[in-house]
Amino acid sequence: MISEDVMPAPSTSSIPHVPVDILRFNTCGSVDDGKSTLIGRLLYDSKSLMEDQIEALERSADITGGGQINLANLTDGLRAEREQGITIDVAYRYFATPRRKFIIADTPGHVQYTRNMVTGASNANLSIILVDARTGVIEQSRRHTAIAALLRIPHLVVAVNKMDLVGWSEARFLEIRAQFEEFLPRLDIKDVKFIPMSALNGDNVVDPSPHTPWYVGPTLLGHLETVHIASDWNLNGFRLPVQWVNRPNNPTDQSLHDFRGFSGQIAGGIVRTGQKVIAFPAGIVTTVKQIWTYDGVVTEAFCPQSVTLVLEHDIDISRGSMLVGLDHLPGSHSDLQAEVCWMHPRALQPGKKYYLKHTTHTVQVSVTEIVNRLNLATLDSDEGAAELAMNDIGEIRLRAAKPLVFDGYATNRLTGSFILIEQGTNATVAAGMLLPPREIVKPENGDYVI
């Protein structure tokens, strides 16, 4: 039986430097809070637009009063979005500064598009919650903050927008901040930044505003460039979901004639040459012989690098298997408990069967129970819900046809998340977050074997 001291967790000093060059963030808030305009302003003022994009904006008939170009059109690409002046679908934009690269997800504000917001925020490092300075904190502000907390987004920016419409009042800014701080402790979000701004005019977005001498913090871009996200990745327990078996069999290179590696993206922890790993679900222990990356052979790799591992022993594993380190073992069980956001017009009801896709593994599951439904207005749980309708978030129990190897979502967002797929239509009907496993399932003889 393997004990926790077989291979101790790496000390802080031994953890390699993770190059932090990409920040993924999303914007969310109520309708007309200025999400798309804020992204347009970021792109425009940071000089991240091509000349043809700027010319298209200037030629566009969508000109606001006063002759200003409509920056929201940079992300609101659907015709219905332009006609209604709202965001419906998730739009992704990319830009870079000398300090960092960025991937932005512009997510909808409507209650009926909660599922779109969850999709866009699912892999974000940071979430920007926009609040209209005139209206302050409303139900949608609480809803989107609660979803960000539920998705375990580690960094939050509360952008108090349209401050120019309240006379750049410091008192109003502090009032809105106090409204947030009333419910933030219930959501366990540790890194929250409040920034007063005007997305339309560019105040405190890229450049500091002369209208807020009472605000001494960074601009939005300044914060995005410097927020520390290296520790957002889980480096405590090695996880490699096997995506495919790499057999190049290159006739011109005899050194690759018998090559057999297991490729995938590291979902957690660090792997080193000579390290012992367990291949799940077989439960077989082996040793890492080589670590291949795009740049060639290395002696160690870490999350979220993509690698190919060559193992010491010729064991039978394939797509859907998972290689894990001997420290911080994951859970493995057929009975699962999870929080889900339901995304389909047909409601979720107990008893129905779905496919559950978790990392590179897909298994059939049945919903055995709806435990509760989250009331995003009050942040309370409604017990005894008979079903989950579209955009509802709730806790459910599932029974899988085969045991799933996983971590709790709070521990590892990559190995603790999944989607549910409807059989027959292959429609994605839910996004889920697994609750912590109850136990580690060992092979029948109680030991891992070679």
Image (spheres, rainbow, N blue to C red):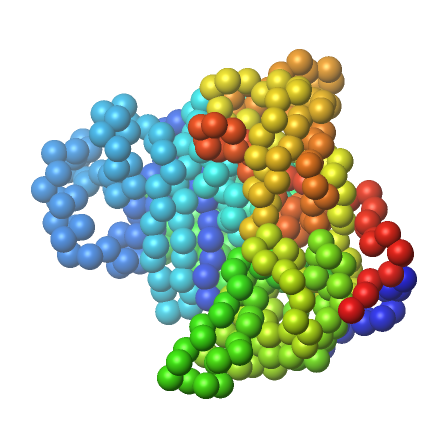
Picture quarter with the N terminus: bottom right
- Residue 446 screen position, x and y as percent: 89, 56
Q: Residue at x 81, y 71 (%)?
A: 8
Q: Is residue 384 left or right of residue 217?
A: right
Residue 410 visible, this orientation: no
Above-or-below relation of 222 to 55? below
Q: Nearer the viewer, residue 7 or 21?
A: 7
- Residue 57 screen position, x and y as percent: 16, 44
Above-or-below relation of 177 to 280? above
Q: Residue at x 65, y 62 (%)?
A: 316
Residue 222, by quadrant, is bottom left
Q: Nearer the viewer, residue 251 or 335?
A: 251
Q: Residue at x 49, y 85 (%)?
A: 255
| Number of numbered labels in the structure image | 0
- Residue 318 screen position, x and y as percent: 59, 58
Above-or-below relation of 308 to 117? below
Residue 152, by quadrant, is top right
Q: Residue at x 81, y 72 (%)?
A: 7
Q: Nearer the viewer, residue 59 or 176?
A: 59
Q: Nearer the viewer, residue 266 or 204?
A: 266
Residue 348 visible, this orientation: yes
Q: Is residue 84 left or right of residue 180?
A: left
Picture quarter with the C terminus: bottom right
Residue 116, by quadrant, is top left
- Residue 228 screen position, x and y as percent: 57, 62
